[in-house]
């Protein structure tokens, strides 16, 4: 759980409050500004209340019929701006690119630890999306096992590749650019689209057109292009939904896997909190979406 700030009160992420966080592991700073003080544009710090910790050894054990694993890993916070009044959508595409370059750097660092099998970058914007601090930030949790969702994604993509001898995400890009009805934004390097039969209203995927399974292997030009299209998407969504709460999630290949043989494709998932998940969805695994993806894409395109 993150440290909370009372509304209108003290914020541990604001500039000049650096002593309220653990020491930074990475920062973009003005020339000459010392670590853990003012003069930064972006800071990465260990979460003060981590879900996982890097101290100790990874221990797997049994408790009766159940399997247990020690909570080994890393949990870091990326403070995206020193200004409390700016959201991610307010930052320039250059500053958003700084954020994703920091994510790339931290992923490369986590890969060096043999205990870590995968890492999850995510952003919770707004209280109902899970943010407990208003100041714009995102997080990375590096885990000692591949997450269940990623395992399912990898298995599904691999099965499609075995059947069709093609990447399912590359095929999705071809299908959607041809049909055009679910495309939100398209650039030279990226496409933002509303997935077919999407679960949530205004759910959007951002996919690089060039096949690549690992985000940490992505070059600067692709990160720049991701930042431009993400800013466009955030601005369009804000204009329609009036600054909704949302989750932003990076999906990328696990660290423990070898070559992907062409079947997986990293991407970013954008989930505005428009419709709520309730008993039917939890009980059935099915979702009632009040805004068809074709309608959502059209509204976003025209925004």
Image (spheres, rainbow, N blue to C red):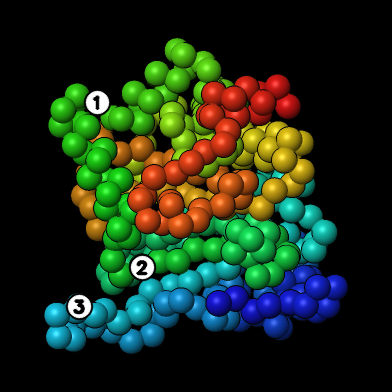
Q: Nearer the viewer, residue 66 or 170?
A: 66
Is residue 212 depicted above or below 130 in this figure? above
Q: Are marks 1 and 3 in contact (CB under 8 Å)?
A: no
Instruction: Determine the residue located farthest toward the top in the rendered image.
Output: 178
Is 203 displayed left or right of 210 in the figure?
Answer: right
Q: Taking 130 as reference, is 267 above or below it?
A: above
Is residue 260 shown above or below 175?
below
Residue 65, image x and y in percent? Answer: 14, 80
In the picture provided, is 8 more to the left or to the right than 44?
right
Q: Residue at x 24, y 80 (%)?
A: 68
**Image position of 254 (left or right of 175):** left
Mark 1: few/some/many CA within 10 Å (<14, 14-19, 20+): some
Quick one: label 1 or label 3, which is nearer the N terminus?
A: 3
User: Which of the two labelled residues, at mark 2 and mark 1, occupies the earlier sequence position?
Assistant: 2
Characterize the local packing of mark 3: few (<14), some (14-19) or many (20 or more) Cα atoms within 10 angstroms.
few
Q: Could you tell me residue 246's position as x and y percent?
A: 61, 51
Q: Are marks 2 and 1 in contact (CB under 8 Å)?
A: no
Question: Could you tell me which quadrant the N terminus lies in?
Answer: bottom right
Q: Helix or strand or loop: what does disc 2 sit on? A: strand
Q: Earlier in the sequence, mark 3 or mark 2?
A: 3
Circle 3 is placed at which residue position?
67
Q: Residue furthest front?
A: 280
Residue at numbered disc 1: 166
Q: Residues within 10 Å of mark 2 (few under 14, many from 20)?
A: many
Task: Say which residue appears at 79% left-offset and 55% top-offset.
Answer: 86
Marks 3 and 2, how far apart at CA: 16 Å
- Name the spot of residue 3 as percent of width and height, x first: 64, 79
Q: Any mark on residue 143, and which?
A: 2
**SS class of the residue under badge 3?**
strand
């Amino acid at each position: 759980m993150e440290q909370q700030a009372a509304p209108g009160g003290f914020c541990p992420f604001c500039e000049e409050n650096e002593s309220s966080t653990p020491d930074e592991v990475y920062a973009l700073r003005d020339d000459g500004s010392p670590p853990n003080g003012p003069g930064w544009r972006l800071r990465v710090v260990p979460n003060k209340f981590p879900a996982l910790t890097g101290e100790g050894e990874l221990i797997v054990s049994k408790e009766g019929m159940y399997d247990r694993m020690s909570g080994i890993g890393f949990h870091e916070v990326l403070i995206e701006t020193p200004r409390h009044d700016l959201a991610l959508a307010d930052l320039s595409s250059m500053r958003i690119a700084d954020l994703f370059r920091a994510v790339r750097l931290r992923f490369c660092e986590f890969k060096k630890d043999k205990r870590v099998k995968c890492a999850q970058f995510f952003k919770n914007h707004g209280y109902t999306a899970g943010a407990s601090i208003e100041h714009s930030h995102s997080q990375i949790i590096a885990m000692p096992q591949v997450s269940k969702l990623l395992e399912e994604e990898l298995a599904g993509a691999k099965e499609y590749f075995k059947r069709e001898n093609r990447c399912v995400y590359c095929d999705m890009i071809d299908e959607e650019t041809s049909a055009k009805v679910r495309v939100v934004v398209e650039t030279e390097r990226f496409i933002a689209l509303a997935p077919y039969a999407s679960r949530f209203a205004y759910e959007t995927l951002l996919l690089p057109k060039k096949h690549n399974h690992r985000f940490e292997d992505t070059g600067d030009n692709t990160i720049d292009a991701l930042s431009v299209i993400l800013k466009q998407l955030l601005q369009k969504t804000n204009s329609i939904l009036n600054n909704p709460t949302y989750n932003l999630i990076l999906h990328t290949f696990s660290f423990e896997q070898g070559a992907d043989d062409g079947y997986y494709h990293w991407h970013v998932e954008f989930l505005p909190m428009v419709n709520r998940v309730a008993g039917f969805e939890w009980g059935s695994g099915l979702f009632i979406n009040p805004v068809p993806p074709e309608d959502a894409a059209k509204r976003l395109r025209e925004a």
